[in-house]
Image (cartoon, grey):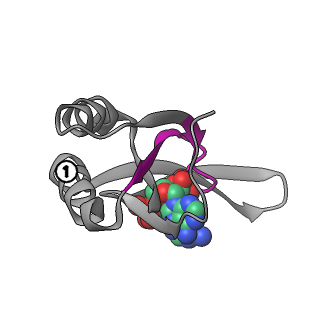
Amino acid sequence: MKLIFAIVNNDDSSSVATSLTAAGFSVTKLATTGGFLKAGNTTFIVGTEDEKVDEVLEVIKAHSRKRTQVMPVTQSFTPGLFSSVPVEVKVGGATVFVLNVERFEKC
Ligand code: 2BA
């Protein structure tokens, strides 16, 4: 058995959740925050059989778009004088980790 952690953009989370559920997978959604952009994203936890991992990844890929987000970067040319420059950051699709599960129980 595997445990899949998938970090997706908040804008894609609803369709990822709906599609995974419709495909018969049990899903847990966590509200998370990216350390770099400090913007909200969604982390999905999916426990599934080894042979179904690719199917889960296909569903996640199909609903996770790549996008560009703009973040302000503050710079200083002279002491005490700051200006903020918008910088484009490419985000996504999904960032996925697949882990082995040692034991799974529903108690
Ligand atoms: P954030 O940390 O907010 O990162 C958003 C996007 O900013 C990243 O997109 C990447 O393109 C860029 N980025 C991140 N750290 C950077 C850095 N030190 N220098 C320059 N650019 C940087 P993605 O790679 O698609 O990641 C989207 C979100 O997935 C991340 O949000 C984070 O929450 C998570 N993530 C990505 N890689 C991870 C990892 N290795 N471990 C844990 N979480 C990860």
Residue 65's place in the image compared with 100, above or below, is above
Quadrant of the snapshot with the C terminus: top right
Q: Residue pushed farthest right?
A: 79
Residue at (25% x, 51% y) in the render: 60
Q: Total label count?
A: 1
Residue 31 percent coordinates (x, y): 55, 33
Residue 15 percent coordinates (x, y): 22, 33
Residue at (34% x, 58% y) in the render: 92
Residue 84's place in the image compared with 106, above or below, is below
Left or right, 22 with reference to 74: left
Residue at (23% x, 37% y) in the render: 24
* Of 78 and 15, the residue lying toward us: 15
Boundaries of the magenta span: 31-48
Task: Give the main secondary structure of the magenta stretch.
Answer: strand
Q: Is mark 1 within 8 Å of ligand 1?
A: no
* Residue 4 lies in the magenta-colored region: no
Residue 39 percent coordinates (x, y): 54, 40
Q: Crowding at label 1, few (<14), some or many (≥20) Cα neighbours within 10 Å?
A: some
Left or right, 30 with reference to 22: right
The residue that mark 1 highlights is 59
Quadrant of the snapshot with the N terminus: bottom left
Residue 19 percent coordinates (x, y): 19, 36
Left or right, 55 with reference to 6: left
Question: Where is residue 68, by image quadrant?
Answer: bottom left
* Of 17 and 3, the residue lying toward us: 3
Question: Where is residue 2, by image quadrant?
Answer: bottom left
* Of 84 and 89, the residue lying toward us: 89
Is disc 1 placed on a helix, strand or loop? Answer: helix
- Amino acid type, residue under disc 1 in the picture: Val
Residue 90's place in the image compared with 83, above or below, is below
